[in-house]
Amino acid sequence: MANLKIIQGGTVVTAEGETRADVLIEGETVVAVGLDLAADGAEVIDATGAYVMPGGIDPHTHMELPFMGTVASEDFFSGTSAAAAGGTTMILDFVIPAPQQRLMDAYKQWREWAAKSAADYSFHVAVTWWDQSVHDDMGTLATEHGVNSFKHFMAYKNAIMCDDEVLVNSFSRARDLGALATVHAENGELVYKLQQEIFDKGITGPEGHPLSRPPEVEGEAANRAIRIAEVLGAPLYLVHTSCIDALEAVTRARLEGQRVFAEVLAQHLVIDDSHYRNPSWEHAAHYVMSPPFRSKEHQDALWRGLQGGMLQTTATDHCCFCTPQKAAGKDDFRKIPNGTGGVEDRMSVLWHHGVRTGRLTPSEFVAVTSTNAAKIFNIHPRKGSLQPGADADIVIWDPEQTRTISKETSHQNVDFNIYEGMEVTGGAATTLSRGNVVWADGELRTVKGAGKHIDRPCFPDYWEGQTKRNTLAEPTAVDRG
Ligand code: URP
Ligand code: ZN
Ligand code: ZN
């Protein structure tokens, strides 16, 4: 048989459990998982002492995003390469049309940019405005282009923010298509007002950023999006849940049987808001992202939310801006491009702070870094699993590998690392993307353009039928004779 590889001697970990097994790969695909498989002349990859897991899926990145007057510094090739170095083999990025831009035009533009990806990718498409063409393009994207999720920014007023009218129209349309509505939950009107007030008080530095985006602002938007989705019977996914207020809204909805999913960023779990008060303006500016970093109390709650299943996925919102780009907001925190990196470090950070502390089992780690995203976005078991027939997106994980995270050794295309100096144990020894080794022996072997777009089909009918609204009694008119 041609192009065979066998990963021998490792412990296979999936979301279901762990077992000693070899993994046989033919071409791009896993063909067998079992003990002492016949090598049949396959190229042997030794995984002794390591875990063999589905490659990570980062469901929230922004490569080369045009945003706040600049363009994110990481492109699709450098970004997917850095991801591979950290054990992540697929990203879900975002097409973000400018208001009044046709969704299809923006989608084609992003597909062109992404053609240089080294690992597989797919797109959420943002709805930033509404008219009949948006309605129609959502249909075309869902039925002909494998887009099953539509994003809504409830913040960024005067740019890409959706008001309630857009949310209602778009959530309804997504529901009818069998697609998933997703939201960045922050009340953009409140942010706008608070930013003005804080700036007028003379607070112009990065410390103004979290003051203008307190947890209540996120909690309000999370709850509003959830309630709108509930009334419409639309499934909903919240990106970058960062605080107790939003987590409580998600928890209440889930306990009431509503189909609501929520994501947490690795950085929101382990980095707190003290960085905004760092004496170095540049340092503080590199932590300007939305929602902002929070206090330890919120971090603890997020960990519990992840452990308890209220938060299902972990992401990075990888959106890099170099120091000269951040400097656009030197005199006004409102103009600092919002975003941080982390696509390379997510898996290590979660292993170190999650698995090594006992918060997560290795199997739970696989669920929250890969499998749950694959299931929620309907690409499982092709992605997020090691079942025969799955794409051979695999990470061979060395649980004893120790490194100190630094921008000096990072493969990310950004001049700052938000985890700088953090020592982590556990990392990717070898990464395979559809059967090809893309990271081994501390070296990248990624190939520009080797990544493929992954279509994500819409969801079956029962998905919509299981939302809470549909369990309410059918409304009836009063017969007045
Ligand atoms: O600050 C952030 N998160 N920048 C990227 C855009 C977004 O809100 O996801
Ligand atoms: Zn966001
Ligand atoms: Zn984002």
Image (cartoon, grey):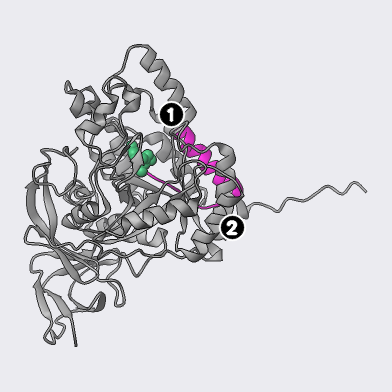
Would residue 265 be seen by someone viewing this image from the given angle?
yes
Which residue lies at the image location 93% right of the left edge and 49% below the top edge? 481
Residue at the spot 8% in from the left edge and 65% down from the top edge: 49
Q: Which of 319 and 265 is in front in this view?
A: 319
Residue type at mark 2?
Asp
- Region of the chain picked out in magenta, as a range: 219-239
Give the residue furthest to the right: 481
- Asked if residue 222 is among those painted magenta in the image, a careful observer would answer yes
Q: Mark 2 points at which residue?
A: 176
Q: Quadrant of ligand 3?
A: top left
Percent of width and height locating residue 33: 22, 77
The quarter of the image holding the N terminus is bottom left
User: What amino acid does circle 1 point to?
Assistant: Glu
**Mark 1 neighbour density, 10 Å: few (under 14) some (14–19) many (20 or more):** some
Of circles 2 and 1, the one toward us is 2
Q: Mark 1 points at which residue?
A: 216
Q: Earlier in the sequence, mark 2 or mark 1?
A: 2
Say left or right for 297 vs 161: left
Could you say where residue 53 lies in the image, as x and y percent from the top left?
22, 65
**Residue sitting at the far top:** 201
* Residue 233 in view, yes or no: no
Image quadrant of residue 156? top left
For mark 2, does the 10 Å Cα neighbourhood hold few (<14), some (14 to 19), or many (20 or more) residues? some
